[in-house]
Image: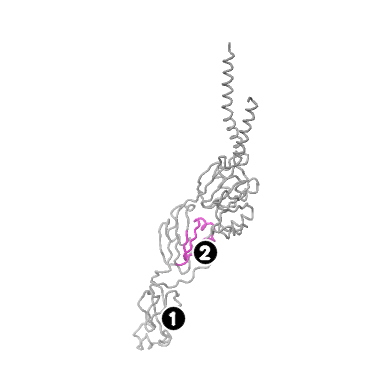
């Protein structure tokens, strides 16, 4: 029981410490290791399954084709159809005959200024009809002026002399477009027969109140909704689609943000301060990579993608049951060419950027804990040896 015992004892303690701390879960860290993320292995039965995608030029091309665009939800690039009458619209009807002495035009010349009669303005009723003398109820709802004109002429052709009708919209109370939210003049206005684009509609409402980079535009049509940053309408003309009658355009302000965790220079939530930024710019905003901690080959971008986009990326979507599939994009910054790819992949609102610690950092932490354990065990042994030596010194003193 001397120094030999002490050495063996400390070696055993150190070995136990190494075994106990060999698992990464026993060491404090800012997140999972790069190897753990790349393995896609679930930590337990409650872990959310995800797919790992290593970023290359093909992946960048797929993402570039599937950025947030209104044309994904509304693929129709055609102008809106002709404006059609709806319940509540006020219309005028003028009926012409080819000669006097017919159903509407008296035979006495000079009694009337022309061979026509103008009916009082009337509202399309709840059944969708208007009333025309001798023609009865004429369907107007869902029809264009030309279609209503033809229907009136057909109803009168056996009673009037070559009748023709002119139908005009006096007060458009349906086929309206609403623009509301963070605009200078919220408005609900009649749709233009010539058609308008989304930016035209926002201009009618006085334009957005705030700066464009933190402004969002939501378009609702036929029960569907799609949202894009305001900058996407300006810088990507394909997003500036036609507005249709009964569309609702909602403009609101919400700073675009992403969060950065792990071995970056700074951690936390960061604003874009622009309408879009790339992964490279996001890493820069977070202070770059920590030179003493980060593993450049283990930079991960967490994001949910639609099933069709995931399939384009080569993911087996049959493993997932949800419409949005969790995907982790891996950027290997040890490859110099990846920096070019990082400038082409855009960060999206609420993305999560995580940089794992290098394996050597975890090994250093393990050695630090082993040293701490052995020192803790060694301290009472040293104290006991010192006490024994002191007693021996006292006993042998003359």
Q: Residue furthest left?
A: 111
Taking 143 as reference, is 330 left or right?
Answer: right
Q: Is residue 228 magenta?
A: yes
Is residue 215 on the magenta stretch? no
Q: Which residue is mark 1?
A: 151
* Range covered by the magenta-colored residues: 218-245
What secondary structure is marked by label 1? helix
Whole-percent x and y of residue 220? 46, 62
Q: Give the position of the C terminus as an image quadrant.
A: top right
* Nearest-to-viewer mark from 1 and 2: 2
* Relative depth, front residue between 381 and 313: 381
- Sequence-wise, the earlier of marks 1 and 2 is 2
Q: Quadrant of the N terminus?
A: top right
In the picture shown, does residue 150 fall above or below 198?
below
The 10 Å Cα crowd at callout 2, few under 14, some 14 to 19, many 20 or more, is: some
Real-space Cα separation, disc 1 to disc 2, in angstroms: 33 Å
Which label sits on residue 74? 2
Q: Looking at the picture, how far across and down is residue 194, in whole percent?
A: 48, 68
In terms of depth relative to the viewer, which is nearer, 149 or 290? Answer: 290
Q: Nearer the viewer, residue 195 or 354?
A: 354
């Amino acid at each position: 029981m001397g120094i030999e015992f002490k050495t063996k004892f400390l070696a055993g303690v150190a070995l136990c410490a190494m075994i106990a701390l060999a698992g990464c879960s026993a060491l404090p860290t800012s997140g999972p290791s790069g190897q753990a993320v790349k393995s896609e292995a679930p930590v337990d039965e409650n872990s959310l399954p995800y797919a790992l995608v290593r970023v290359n030029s093909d992946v960048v091309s797929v993402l570039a084709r599937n950025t947030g665009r209104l044309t994904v939800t509304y693929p129709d690039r055609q102008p809106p159809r002709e404006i059609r009458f709806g319940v509540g619209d006020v219309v005028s009807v003028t009926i012409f005959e080819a000669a006097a002495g017919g159903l509407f035009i008296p035979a006495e010349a000079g009694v009337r200024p022309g061979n026509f009669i103008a009916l009082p303005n009337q509202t399309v009723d709840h059944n969708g009809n208007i009333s025309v003398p001798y023609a009865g109820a004429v369907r107007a709802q869902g029809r264009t002026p030309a279609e209503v004109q033809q229907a009136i002429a057909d109803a009168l052709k056996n009673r009037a002399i070559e009748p023709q009708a002119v139908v005009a919209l006096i007060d458009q109370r349906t086929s309206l477009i609403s623009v509301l939210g963070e605009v200078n003049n919220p408005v609900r206005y009649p749709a233009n027969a010539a058609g308008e684009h989304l930016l035209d509609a926002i201009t009618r409402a006085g334009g957005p109140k705030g700066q464009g980079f933190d402004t969002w535009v939501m378009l609702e049509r036929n029960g569907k909704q799609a949202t894009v940053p305001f900058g996407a309408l300006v810088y990507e003309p394909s997003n500036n689609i036609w507005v249709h009658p009964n569309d609702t355009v909602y403009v609101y302000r919400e700073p675009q943000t992403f969060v950065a965790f792990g071995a970056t220079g700074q951690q936390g939530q960061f604003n874009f301060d622009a309408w879009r930024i790339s992964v490279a710019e996001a890493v820069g905003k977070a202070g770059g990579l920590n030179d003493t901690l980060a593993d450049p080959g283990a930079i991960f971008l967490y994001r949910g993608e639609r099933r069709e986009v995931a399939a384009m990326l080569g993911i087996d979507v049959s493993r997932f049951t949800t419409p949005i599939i969790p995907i982790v994009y891996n950027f290997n910054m040890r490859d110099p060419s990846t920096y070019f790819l990082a400038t082409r992949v855009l960060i999206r609102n609420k993305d999560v950027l995580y940089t794992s610690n290098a394996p050597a950092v975890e090994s250093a932490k393990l050695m630090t804990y082993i040293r701490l354990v052995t020192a803790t065990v060694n301290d009472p042994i040293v104290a006991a040896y010192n006490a024994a030596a002191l007693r021996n010194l006292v006993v042998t003193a003359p």
